[in-house]
Amino acid sequence: MPNSMAPAMNVTMIVCSALSLVFMSLRFFSKHLVSTKLGIDDAVLLFSWLLFVTFIVLSIYATKFGLGKHYEDADLTKLPRLLYLLPIGQFFAVISVAVSKSSFILTLLKLVTVTWQKAALWFMLVTINGSMFSIAVVQFFQCSVPPTPGCVQNDAVIGLGSYAAGYSATMDLVLTAFPAIVIWNLQMKSSDKFGIIASMSLGIVAGVVGIYKTSTIGLVARNADFTYGTAFPLIWLSAEVSATVIAASIPFFRPLVRMIKGTEAKDSSYALSKVSRPGTNPLNRTHEQLEDDNRSDQYILKPGSNNILRETTYTVQHSYEGEDKAGYTDHSQRGHGNAY
């Protein structure tokens, strides 16, 4: 057992923050490739990363006051400062977890059209933020030695913390199923569907990390060597936030992948926010939609586009003397662009 967990904690936190920043930046760059403006989910994800960095800075600073050291090796005169910094750092960390998951939920809300799916996502958005914000605030009122009037008992704080962390991790696992439900009925190639579903289901990694982190909360909170033990959940907390940010960023990498392969990055079918919904499937059009495009497949083209390559006109002629009954006229090369 090392004498101090501070070096391992510091390295892990720095690596996690750097990796999440790289993936988040690539997400923004991929959106730039398809000329897509950053949305509220992007702003929320960036905000979660800033909260994450604030937590890391406070945690690394707290190592100067004994965080990561064994209790018997810590300078007891510095412990009050450590006990002051820990709740503040954990506040930013817990809120960062909730906000990063909120970004992914907001992305899914852009894609869903079914009422029950929207209701389920909003329920998860509200309950995740509510539970995580509750523990982030309650920890400031945890009873100390000696206890102050009106403080919250340690067991209650530990129980609420374990519940909030466990619920958040469980919702990660639930959210991994939503991409399959949402994406499967969209109008796109099966290979594209499988790719997006797989990339959007990477949140399962954050869920597994969150579950393991939850299992350490009670053990560390009741451990007399708390200065040393607290480093473990903080390390896993960093990994959870980083995994969530990365999982929320990868689904947007398709334009970047196409650019690397040398294909056209601005193909809107590779922009996650621009995929066609079931209502635009030409096989499921309403009577009014059929009349609007002269009962043709023009409806699947973008408004105002001129992408028809070939137009064919048939002329039917009747003859009563055995002549040819049909003539054929071909008018070609109208317009330009992609054939559909």
Image (cartoon, grey):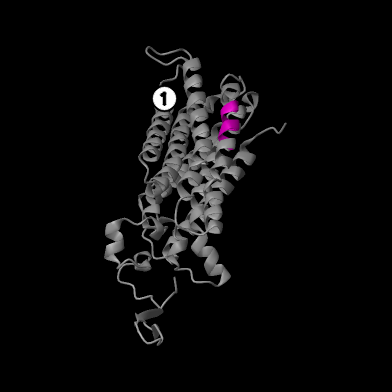
Residue 15 lies, with reference to residue 74, above or below; the image says: below
Question: Which image quarter is the C terminus in?
Answer: bottom left
Magenta stretch: includes residue 22: no
Q: Main secondary structure of the magenta part?
A: helix
The structure residue drawn at horizontal position 42% and vertical position 49%, both measured from the top left corner, is: 46
Instruction: Read off the residue under disc 1.
Output: 140
Magenta segment: 209-216
Residue 254 lies, with reference to residue 208, above or below; the image says: below
Whether residue 204 appears in this view of the structure is: yes
User: Residue at the front extreme?
Assistant: 321
Residue 7 lies, with reference to residue 1, above or below; the image says: below
Magenta stretch: includes residue 214: yes
Q: Position of residue 338 (x, y in %)?
A: 44, 74
User: Residue at the right extreme?
Assistant: 1
Question: 183 or 270, which is in the foreground?
Answer: 183
Displayed quadrant of residue 125: top left
Q: Inspect the image, locate mark 1, and give the three-letter code of the amino acid beneath it.
A: Phe
Q: Position of residue 252 (x, y in %)?
A: 48, 56
Whether residue 51 appears in this view of the structure is: no
241 on left or right of 281: right
The local secondary structure at tag 1 comes to: helix
Question: Which image quarter is the N terminus in?
Answer: top right
The structure residue drawn at horizontal position 53% and vertical position 67%, both measured from the top left corner, is: 258
